Structures are given as C-alpha cells and as structure tokens.
Amino acid sequence: MQRDELVEKITKDLDGKLENVERPSGKRAYLYVHPKRSLEVNRYLYELGGRLATATGVDSRDYIEVLYHYCFDSMNIVVTVKTRAFKPEVEIDSVAQVFPGAEWIEREIHDLLGVKFKDHPRLERLILSDDWEEGVYPYRRDYKK
Amino acid sequence: MSLKTWAFKKSPWVYHVNVGACNNCDIEILDCLTPRFDIERFGMLLVPSPRHADVLLVTGIATRQAVPRLREVYEQTAKPCAVLCIGHCACSMGIFAPSYHAAGPPDKIIREIDPNAIIAYVPGCPPKPEAIILGAVKALSVV
Amino acid sequence: MNALSTALIYVVGVVGTAVVGLLSKWIDRKVSARIQWRVGPPWYQPVADIIKLLGKETIVPEAARKTGFLLAPLVGLAAVSVAAAILWAANIRPELDFVGDVIVVLYLLTIPAIAIIAGGAASGNPHGVVGASREMKTLLAYELPFVLAIICAIVAKDNSFKLGDLVTTNVVGGWAVAGSVIAFVIAIFCIQAKLGLPPFDMAEAETEIMGGVYVEYSGAALAVVQLTRAMMLATLPIFLVTVFWGGFSFQSWAILGSILKYVVILVVLILVKNTNPRVRIDHALKFFWFVLTPVAVLAVIMSLAGSSL
C-alpha cells in the first residue's frame, strides 16, 4: 500500500471520529482527535500495523496536547494522533491497555506534565526524584524553579 | 615525605561514580584505562568497591535523586581519600545549572559532609584523557 | 639440627614467601601489561599497594559480624604462612619433613579459601554472600582433581607421604612418567582456580558482583587479604615444583634452574589468565568434575601401573 492510499483508508475508516486531517508533507500525517475518541483511534492504528514510536506532550494554554506517533515503516510515513487533555482536570484515556510499551511513556508524561491517564495499570513516579513534591510539574509553562 | 604519603601517591585506586552525567566523561575515563593512555603505570587500578578506593572520579551534575547516594558513597570510602570532579558538569553544573533536577555541583554536596575534603577539578566537555591524567597527578602532588 | 636453625629456616620460609609473592604479583601485572601492549607498573607497585592499604582506615559495616569479618583474613594468612614454612623447610633441608606433611600442606592450602568464604559471608553485604557461595562451589570443584593429582605423584614416587622423599625421588617407568605429567597439567588447572585467576575468578568478579567476597574490606584487613593472595601465588607453584618437579636446590648454579621452574609455572598461569574470559560457575563445576577428574583417575591408574611394574 502506498502512503496516500494509507491516509485515504484511515480517513475513510475513521470518518466521523476525526476532527481534522493534515498532510504537512509526504512523510507525515496529523490526525486531530477529540479525547473521547483517542483510545479508539489508537487501537485502530495499532491494528492497522502501525508501531507506536513514542508519545509526546505539549503544554498549550487551555489544554495539554498529547501526541501519539505511529510509524508505518514499510511505507516510510509517520501518522500522529493529536489529542488534548483539557485543564483543569487534565485527564485522558490510557493507551497502555492496547500497547503495553506505552506504559512507561505515559508515566513519564504524567511525571513531567501532570496528565492523568485513566485505567493506567501503574501510574507512579518514574523519572523525578523520590523526594519531589507532589503536584509540581516541571514541564508546565507556569513552573518556576 | 613520609612512607604513608609516598605509598598513597604511588598507588591511588580509583572508583568511578556517575551522578547524573551524559556518559561522555565516563567514556573518556574508560579511555584512560585502555592501553593507549595506560594509567596502571602510575599504580592506578579501577576497583569494584568504594571501600577499596582512594580517589573517587565523580562525573555529572548531582541530580536530586543522586544526592543521597553520592553522600553514602563518599562516606563509604575509606579515608584518606581524594575526589576528582571530571567535566564541566561536575565542576560547576555547566549549562544545566537552571535545570529542575540540578541539586548543586558534587563538590558542594561533599563539602557539606566533609569540609576538609580534597577535591580537584578537571574541566572539559569532555576532558581529554590526557587532561584527566594531568588532573590526577596534580591532585596527588598536593596530598 | 638444633632448634634455633630450624626456627630460622621456618622464618626464612615465611618472609621469603612474602617477598617472592609480592615480586610474582608484580611479574603478573607487568607481563599482563606487556601482553596488552601497555607499560606496566614499576617493580615496587605491590609493596606500595600494601603500605598504602595499611595507612587507610578499616571500616567495619554495621551489618557485619565484626569478629568473624576481621578474623577471617588473619586465619588465611596464618594458614598460608605455615604451609609456606613447611614447604621451604622441606626444600632447604629435605630431612626436616615428617610423615604426612603432604597432607598437612594440602589441608593448610584450602584454609585461605574457607577463611575468605567466612569473611565474605560475615560482611553483611549481599554481594559478599553471593561471592562466598561462588567461592564455595569453586572450592568443591577444584579440590577433587587437585587431590587426585597429588595422589598420582605420591603413588609414582614409591608411596611416600613425606615431602622430602617426594623431592629426592625420581619417577621411573614409562607409564608412571606419563601419569605424572598428566597429573602436573591437571594440577596447574587446579591452582588457576585456587588462586582466583581468570577463567575461574567467579568469586571475585569485578564487573559482576562488585568485588564479591572482598567488597566490604578496607584498610588493614584488605592489606592482609592482598598479602595472603600474594603468598598463595608464591606458595602454590612452589608446592607443585616440590611434588612433581624435583623441588628447589640451593647449590650454586642449580638455583637458576629452580627459579626457572617456578617462573615457567608462573608464566603459564599469567598467559592463561590473560587469554581467557571468565566462565560460569556451573561450567567450571562440569569442567573440573567431568573432564579433569576422569583424566586424573586415569593418571593415578597409569602411575600405579608404572610404579609396580
């Protein structure tokens, strides 16, 4: 399957669940997804053959944007799922049930940005020190040392 | 020079502690042990336990998680001992000073528990093995 | 022989072993360095190590059993000193031996390993306990073929249990010579393990278990441990030369020949040490029990056949 066919297939199959689809270049595709739909879209992409490379988090003003990057290695394309975790609760479904490798990635995002992942098997401190204060998230824009 | 000082200078056993380094300095320390630079001719041996060590090679800014561990390792080392801070990060935290996890350069932490600690600094990012050897020789010459 | 000169010979034995041991340790480090295309340490390095260790503080961890922890290295040092004294006495004056001194020396040479097991287990550190258990298994592994090899030499030399007789008797008979040579080779393998040299240094594995049995020793206790190991490095090849190779003779030019015998064994140990990686403990057990022991039994049978024909 070629890249454009893949993106068309995704757009068709997930019709109604995506808010927007962007192709900034031949090798990247962004799928904007509402947080309620994020688990379904992730599960679909994983079953389609995508490999979850990593997940990233960005602190925007009213929400924290969580991005899941899926690599389709044979086609040389990275499909990114962009969801938002709205402040102040900052909650989103965890992808770890679908993809066990996402467990630690989501723990790291929780440590540094404070995103609460629902139904995560083990949401504990991962990379901050043991004596770090609760509720202080260093990667948020309003963090002061 | 007394016999004790002579023996200390001629046979400094090193133990390597990494308290939050990017591993560049660690690789350069490993280079020192290879046949090209050969620190065994100075009597330096890499020992597996801090109790056997005379010189602690400290690399990295001390992250908050590593601070209690660094204190323990320093206390476990049999005195008299010297500390060699290797790399910009160990000397002064370098560009990572404003980071959220930086808890003071290692020499500040060691001086809190032992104000008379012998500490030498080898700046560089990473310092060349020749610079590390020079730092070690200078540190031993003031013991 | 009056008592004073006997005592003098024993003292010379102990001090001589310490000197030869530290010198051998230097030879070991220098030859290893040259094999690795490095310049090695200077000749006084092992002495400087011991003096430096004596000048540092001895820390006893809180979780350790203080008495056992500190006494164990001393027991090891005492055992190897007595064994060295007996060996040197038998070589300098072969009439100073007594019946069964081979067995006494064999027992004494196992005590440093047992002492280290006790010391490692008493150190209160999991690394020490793991190292102690590994040393126990290594001890079980190499003692069997070692004893069989010594038995082979005793059998080949007219069933005498005195070191002096072992030194002065020559082996006759083709089968017995072959058996003795095989036993000699097996004994060299065994002392490689006894000395804790690679490939059999599982008990003190620097990269795996942080020094194993020696992890909590520091200062004077560590100096005693290092001295014991150096003396073992001197005593075991001397034991082998005494039992298998006709001992040391101290008449004019024969001294050079004796030193050459010792150096040959030392160099074999160093070369094997530098060319082999560490083996796993179960591989070591299988090697000693299922490869070396049958060969040792074969050597004993050959010696029996050769000496009775």
Image (cartoon, coloured by chain):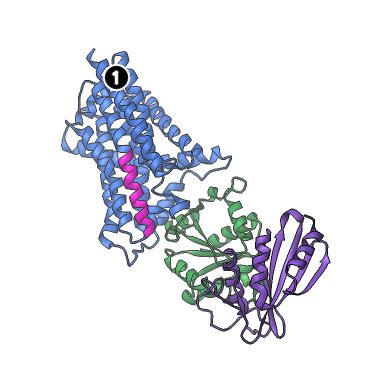
Chain colours: A purple, B green, C blue
Callout 1: few (<14), some (14-19), or many (20+) C-alpha neighbours within 10 Å? many
Task: Kindly indicate the quadrant of the structure image that contains residue C9.
Answer: top left
Image x and y of residue A57, in percent: 67, 74
Using the image, name the chain to which the residue with label 1 belongs. C
The three-letter code of the residue at mark 1 reads: Met
Residue segment shown in magenta: C126-141
Instruction: Where is residue C1? Give x, y as percent.
Output: 17, 32
Q: Is residue B42 visible?
A: yes
Secondary structure at numbered mark 1: helix
Question: In the image, what residue occupies the spot 48% across and 52% down?
Answer: C207
Quadrant, the N terminus of chain A: bottom right
Q: Position of residue C261 (x, y in %)?
A: 39, 28
Residue on which the image places disc 1: C302
A40 lies left or right of C92: right
A98 vs B97, nearest the viewer = A98
Image quadrant in which you'd find residue C241: top left
